[in-house]
Amino acid sequence: MQTSRPQQFVAVFDFGAQYGQLIARRVRDLNVYSEMVPCDISADELAAMAPAAIILSGGPASVYADDAPDMDGRIFELGVPILGFCYGQQIMAVKLGGKVGHTEKGEYGPAELCRCGESRILAGTPGSQTVWMSHRDAVSDVPAGFSVTSTTETCPIASMEDASRRFYATQFHPEVRHTACGQAMLENFLFGICGLGRSWTMDNIIDEKVAEIREQVGGRKVILALSGGVDSSVVAALVHRAIGDQLTCVFVNHGLLRKGEPEMVEEVFREQFNVPLVHVHAEERYLRLLAGVSDPEQKRRLIGGEFWKVFFEEAQKIGDVEMLAQGTIYPDIIESGARKTGGKASTIKSHHNLIPFPEGVRFDLIEPLDHFFKDEVRALGIALGLPAKMVWRQPFPGPGLAIRIIGEVTSEKLDMLREADAVVREELDAYNGRLFEETGDRNSEHSCWQYFAVLPDIRSVGVMGDERTYARPVIVRAVESSDAMTADWAKLPYEVLGKISSRIVGEVDGVNRVVYDVTPKPPATIEWE
Ligand code: XMP
């Protein structure tokens, strides 16, 4: 079921993947709702979405190249204010009758910008200022009606505008931090020129979403699979705020969560929020299912498949449920490529949340977070009253500890790993906290983003007291990353590693050795299975 976008909406045309996202973020940082649209969207489709403003992103192509990304020129006739950056300036020029020239000498990095003449975009910024350039081509002739508003040494048309039609463009990139007054320029456009309000605030978002969910749901019953993860927890809190006891949360406890997690789900949702919660104790069922299985993919398949079986068994017990709430977020949609401009047929999480509905079972989906970035989901969670430790939970794989136990999963190994993992998290939470206090920021080399313990399927000899032991090692994995696509091992101080090691060996029965994984991704992955 499609959720509507807020009324004030800025459409960002993406002419090159890495640029559009950043612009959408910058606009949202100014409390204006913004979303990327494919650059080849037709004027009619776009008009149906009723954007209040349009921003054309940069991109690596040359406007005259055969395969250059194009846009529908009729979009310039919609009467909507448009701001273009870099490639966005060039395509605006070409579409409106100006010219773009190919220069031999590109301009990359910081450049000194000199203003000339009146400019509404540059209003309030200094006559001379630093901007960030990254281009070879540049506009050589502005279209009729435009004036040049700034230059740099190598770029005679560094910005241009036609205030009467509300078209503005810059060759430089206001969205990157290196452009000193970039945010002021965006503010000039959004607030001064387009007259938008700062309406994308958490309080407004909650009110808007609550009203929308109430309308979508009516008097129907909704069910939600609560995993203890950030997205499902925030959806649960939001949907519960909207429809109260019409929502039932089903928490399938597969016994593969970390220490304290099932208790936290109970405490937050049952005690604090008073949400009708079904806690399904499926721990034994999962142990039987996983007995003798050591292949990682087989573990993933079995765990995922069983989850939905258990979930739908419970749904049937509740009865009369017509809707399923899901924690799909905006990056899931972008990743799965499911977003189509006018609406979206299916925006189910592509990688791990594809729902295998049983024969004859159908629910209407509601996905109230499908327009949100991850950090916005977190902010929403905090605004809804979820505890910080739940909202800032590290990424944790759906198959849980099962893929951090190499080889067969048993209840003894789970206990051992859970205890060792709790020590790793306790020590590294404290370490990250100290580092943050000292530096006021995350330190990209030393701090860690995801950290946990892994239990390999081997034993080694040790000595404890007067006795030889033949027990298990624990692997500590701690990585620094921003998106899990690449990662580096965290350069932890020896004292921290030493303390983790002595605590694990001292506190966890059956462990006599601790090793640290010093492999980046690639070539390794973050998880061991
Ligand atoms: P890798 O191991 O591929 O992990 O470097 C990248 C990120 O994804 C998480 N991960 C998973 N998440 N189901 C999930 O929901 C999975 O099967 C899964 N496997 C890995 C991992 O924790 C890391 O953050």
Image: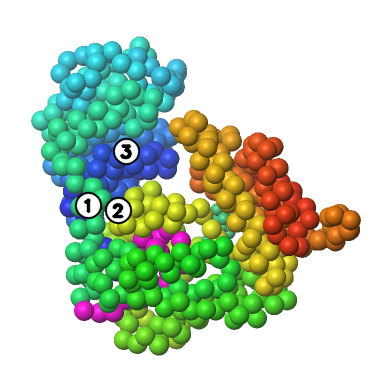
Q: Are marks 2 and 1 in contact (CB under 8 Å)?
A: yes
Q: Secondary structure at mark 2?
A: helix
Residue under the image location 24 percent in, 13 percent down:
127
Q: Tell me which numbered mark, 2 or 3, is placed earlier along the sequence.
A: 3
Left-right relation of 487 to 75? right
Residue under the image location 70 percent in, 70 percent down:
412
The quarter of the picture where residue 87 lies is: top left
Q: Secondary structure at mark 3?
A: helix
Q: Which amino acid type is marked by label 2?
A: Ala
Q: Which amino acid type is marked by label 3?
A: Arg
* The stretch drawn in magenta includes residue 182: no
Q: Which amino acid type is marked by label 1?
A: Asp
- Residue with the mark numbered 2: 383
Residue 26: give its label: 3
* The stretch drawn in magenta includes residue 224: yes
Quarter of the rendered structure image containing ligand 1:
bottom right
Badge 1: few (under 14), some or many (20 or more) residues near its Cα, within 10 Å?
Answer: few
Where residue 470 appears, as percent x and y from the top left, is 85, 61
Residue under the image location 83 percent in, 55 percent down:
464
Badge 3: few (under 14), some or many (20 or more) residues near its Cα, within 10 Å?
Answer: some
In the rendered image, the vertical position of residue 251 relative to residue 235, given as above or below: below
Residue 376: give its label: none
Q: Secondary structure at mark 1?
A: helix
Is residue 13 visible to us here?
no
- Residue with the mark numbered 1: 203
In the rendered image, the vertical position of residue 205 relative to residue 193, given as above or below: below
Where residue 429 appears, as percent x and y from the top left, is 54, 46
Q: Which residues are magenta?
A: 219-235
Q: Tell me which numbered mark, 1 or 3, is placed earlier along the sequence.
A: 3
